[in-house]
Amino acid sequence: MSAEKRNALGKGLSALLNDSVNVLPNKNEIGTSSDVNGMGSVNEIKIAEIEVNPFQPRTDFDQEALAELADSIKLQGLIQPITVRKVNAHKFQLISGERRLRASKLAGLTQIPAYVRTANDQQMLEMALIENIQRENLNAIEVALSFQRMIDECSLKQEELGERVSKNRSTVTNYLRLLKLPPTIQASIRDNQISMGHAKALISVSDAVKQLYIHQQIIQQELSVRKVEEMVRDMQKAPVKKEGKQPEPLSFQVQKIQDDLASKFSTNVKLKLNSQGKGSIEIPFLSEDDLNRILEMLDW
């Protein structure tokens, strides 16, 4: 690979956006919102004329970090321009840099330095996702959701996605598999209650009930990743009980009740109902501690 190509790959999003200028121009080179300069130059855009990117994958921003960035902008100005696309003479749409835009508003700026680009909606989504994955401190679930959006909405294969974000296919696959975990576990990953290492161990467990049980033990006992991996290995060694005759499918209403109960008790609740309307509710547990947890929820 030539040195020129290696340098282009090293630029990340900058190379994707085809930026040719990385510093602010002189004052007499800066255009106005209605009269922007060329594609490789930086323009001063009125903040009031910029609308946020509707494809922005990140919805939560650390307010303390934003305040710190705003203080820095007050003292030193905005070092790194945002990137926008021109909608009309007095309207621009943010492609990347929402954190910088928000902080600039907090700092009281009325104008902001920006690269002006031409991009269709798919390009905007891809640019915003790539910038967030590479530059923002996203949690693993946010990364996984961004990967899934790139696959679904940008029509990318996993190999192509890996190339875009400089990650190998196995890493991409591990992130995407997080989205198959029960919502309770996904929320714990999002809230940094369990690590990516814990999540990878849980992914290897095929039974959602067992996943939820191990997840509960991780939270309650603050288990290490190694301990969780040992639990998973022990569970997988246990003999598998053969299933008997499959019951008749449940109606939509009964299935909804069963799902709600399973969510409430964090276990795979089974609701059985015969043609006469009689039946039973089965609430499985995996240990004495798990049983006590369920009994407490029932006010026993």
Image: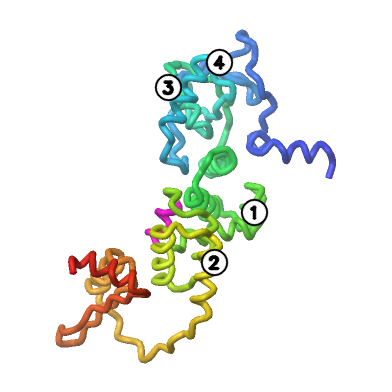
Which residue is denoted by mark 4 in the rendering? 76
Which residue is denoted by mark 2 in the rendering? 229
The mark closer to the camera, 2 or 1, is: 2
**With 227 as the anchor, is 160 left or right in this view?**
right
Label 2, label 4: how many angstroms apart (C-alpha)? Answer: 48 Å
First in sequence: mark 1 or mark 3? 3
Q: In the image, what residue occupies the spot 55% across and 27% down?
A: 82
Magenta highlight on residue 183: yes
**With 109 as the anchor, is 164 left or right in this view?**
right
Magenta highlight on residue 251: no
For disc 3, the neighbor class at 10 Å (few under 14, some 14 to 19, many from 20) is some
Which residue is denoted by mark 3 in the rendering? 105
| Magenta stretch, residue numbers | 182-189
Label 2, label 1: how many angstroms apart (C-alpha)? Answer: 31 Å
Tell me where residue 295 appears, x and y as whole percent. 24, 69
Amino acid type, mark 1: Glu
The mark closer to the camera, 1 or 3, is: 3
The mark closer to the camera, 3 or 2, is: 2
Q: Where 271 falls versus 199 (above or below)?
A: below
Which residue is denoted by mark 1 in the rendering? 160
Give the SS element for disc 4: helix
Q: In the image, what residue occupies the spot 43% across and 36% down?
A: 61
Give the SS element for disc 3: helix
Tell me where residue 194 appears, x and y as whole percent. 46, 54
